[in-house]
């Protein structure tokens, strides 16, 4: 009996780890999708506009291209959250992954800026279901496993910050390998190669998910099933027939309720005028972190590719990719070494604040880094910027790990997919607006000494304000 029980525990653990791996792979694909465009996006829009990369038209179009993806997330994240409550988590995840595999390939074949914008928007539509990933994971974990599970999810996101720019650095292959790619399809479509490779990876993940991913929402909790069940129950009651509960559904419901204490009726949250203050405070912090990180990513990519005369570094897409990849190694080290002991010792709130401090210091020192912008410093330019990204991304990783756990705790007892859908919509709004805001501020401050770095200080101040407003709710969840 004991041996059988141990075997069941081991089997359950293997199943959990396998599901976690698939969810992590989907998060990795999403992160690659967002960041793959960073190394080549500015040069791509400059090519279509027939402008220099340092021109205001090119930088503005690049900011719009980055933001457009998030604008469509804004619109469709709540939609995907509601759909996930109606038909289940698994179908939404698979549909989104299939669309994510298709849209970038179409964008890589685009022959005009209008076509590129259209397919980038389509990509954002399918990415709107990324909130369902956090919902799915939230229904798998309990209090004891949430820290490791959500930090793994963030780690996969950060690994995408490495793999995405690495793929993006393969754009314009006829320039860096003319003997191999010259006079080929990849010469005619210079950004097709990274998008094609990405599409292949996303398709593989989608197939694995289709085969192995299981639904976490019991059939008894699917809204369309519940509606049909109520109608059927009324008919049976009219005939005086009793209805027994499906043992399998009951078992599944019990397992989900362990991870998501669904004490209220599934429709209760939807009938409320608004979520609680604590939930809103967590969503605000989540949106603030996402917006600041997106602004920082856009700013550094612009600075790295601007000419030295504009306080830039004059990097090529391949050089941008190199620095971004080296920076992404920081969170990997953090996850594998000191994050979990740090969480046990300090708690999630202090980890969040420490991450904010590390991130702020790293990016606000860019006026110092610009002193080494001259090519005469050679490899030292890459070492300094790589270390800055390395440290800054550790701070980013710590903030996202903490806020994901807070979001999971705040949505207990609510329609988790719907809450995550609205949170993802707010995050997408923040990510859409912040690059445009940062780019506009950068242009407006160019005339000032080191004014090009001013957006770093402004975005840091905005995130500090979000943390101050949300402090009471975060403290409450940290002690929960």
Image (spheres, rainbow, N blue to C red):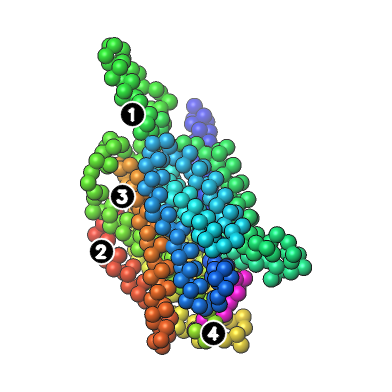
Quick check: is 435 in the magenta stretch?
no
The residue nearer to you, when weighing 444 against 11, is: 444
Which tag is nearer the camera, tag 2 or tag 4?
4
The residue at which mark 4 appears reads as 308
- The location of residue 401, given as percent across then percent down, is 42, 57
User: How many neighbours does mark 2 have within 10 angstroms: few (below 14), some (14-19), or many (20 or more)?
Assistant: some
The residue at which mark 3 appears reads as 410
Residue 184: which quarter of the image?
A: bottom right
Q: CA distance from mark 2 to mark 1?
A: 40 Å
- Residue 419 seen anywhere in this rendered image of the structure: yes
**Picture layout, residue 184 above or below residue 411:** below
The residue at which mark 1 appears reads as 227
Which tag is nearer the camera, tag 3 or tag 1?
1
Residue 447: which quarter of the image?
A: bottom left
Q: Residue at x 34, y 50 (%)?
A: 422
The residue at which mark 2 appears reads as 469
The residue nearer to you, when weighing 103 against 283, is: 103
Outermost residue to the right:
179
Quick check: is 316 in the magenta stretch?
yes
| Magenta stretch in the rendered image | 311-320
User: How many neighbours does mark 3 have within 10 angstroms: few (below 14), some (14-19), or many (20 or more)?
Assistant: many
């Amino acid at each position: 009996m004991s041996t059988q029980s141990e075997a069941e525990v081991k089997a359950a653990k293997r199943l959990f780890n396998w599901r976690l791996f698939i969810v992590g792979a989907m998060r990795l694909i999403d992160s690659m999708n967002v960041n793959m465009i960073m190394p080549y996006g500015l040069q791509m829009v400059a090519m279509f506009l027939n402008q220099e990369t340092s021109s205001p038209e090119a930088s503005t179009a690049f900011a719009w291209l980055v933001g457009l993806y998030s604008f469509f997330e804004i619109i469709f994240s709540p939609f995907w959250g509601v759909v996930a409550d109606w038909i289940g988590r698994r179908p939404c995840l698979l549909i989104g992954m299939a669309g994510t595999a298709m849209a970038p390939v179409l964008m890589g074949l685009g022959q005009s800026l209008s076509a590129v914008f259209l397919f980038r928007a389509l990509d954002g539509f399918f990415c709107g279901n990324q909130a369902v990933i956090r919902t799915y994971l939230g229904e798998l974990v309990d209090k004891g496993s949430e820290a490791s599970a959500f930090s793994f999810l963030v780690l996969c996101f950060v690994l995408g910050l490495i793999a995405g720019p690495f793929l993006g650095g393969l754009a314009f292959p006829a320039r860096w390998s003319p003997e191999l790619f010259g006079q080929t399809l990849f010469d005619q479509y210079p950004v097709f190669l990274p998008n094609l490779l990405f599409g292949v990876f996303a398709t593989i993940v989608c197939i694995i998910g289709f085969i192995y991913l299981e639904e976490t929402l019991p059939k008894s909790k699917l809204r369309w099933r519940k509606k049909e069940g109520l109608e059927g129950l009324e008919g049976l009651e009219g005939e005086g027939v009793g209805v027994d509960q499906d043992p399998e559904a009951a078992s599944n419901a019990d397992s989900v309720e362990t991870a998501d204490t669904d004490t209220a009726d599934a429709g209760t949250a939807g009938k409320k005028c608004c979520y609680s203050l604590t939930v809103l405070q967590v969503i605000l912090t989540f949106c603030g972190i996402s917006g600041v990180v997106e602004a920082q990513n856009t700013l550094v990519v612009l600075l790295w590719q601007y000419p030295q005369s504009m306080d830039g570094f004059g990097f090529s897409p391949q050089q941008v990719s190199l620095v971004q990849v080296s920076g992404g190694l920081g969170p990997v080290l953090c996850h594998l070494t000191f994050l979990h002991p740090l969480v046990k010792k300090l708690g999630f709130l202090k980890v969040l604040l420490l991450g904010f401090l590390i991130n702020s210091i790293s990016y606000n020192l860019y006026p110092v880094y610009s002193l080494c912008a001259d090519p005469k410093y050679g490899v030292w330019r890459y070492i300094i910027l790589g270390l800055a990204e390395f440290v800054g991304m550790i701070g980013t990783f710590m903030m996202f790990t903490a806020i994901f756990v807070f979001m999971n705790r705040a949505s207990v007892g609510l329609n988790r997919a719907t809450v995550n859908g609205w949170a993802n919509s707010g995050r997408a709004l923040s990510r859409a607006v912040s690059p445009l805001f940062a780019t506009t501020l950068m242009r407006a401050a160019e005339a000032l000494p080191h004014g090009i770095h001013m957006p770093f200080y402004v975005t840091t101040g905005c995130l500090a304000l979000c943390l101050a407003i949300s402090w009471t709710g975060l403290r409450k969840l940290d002690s929960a």
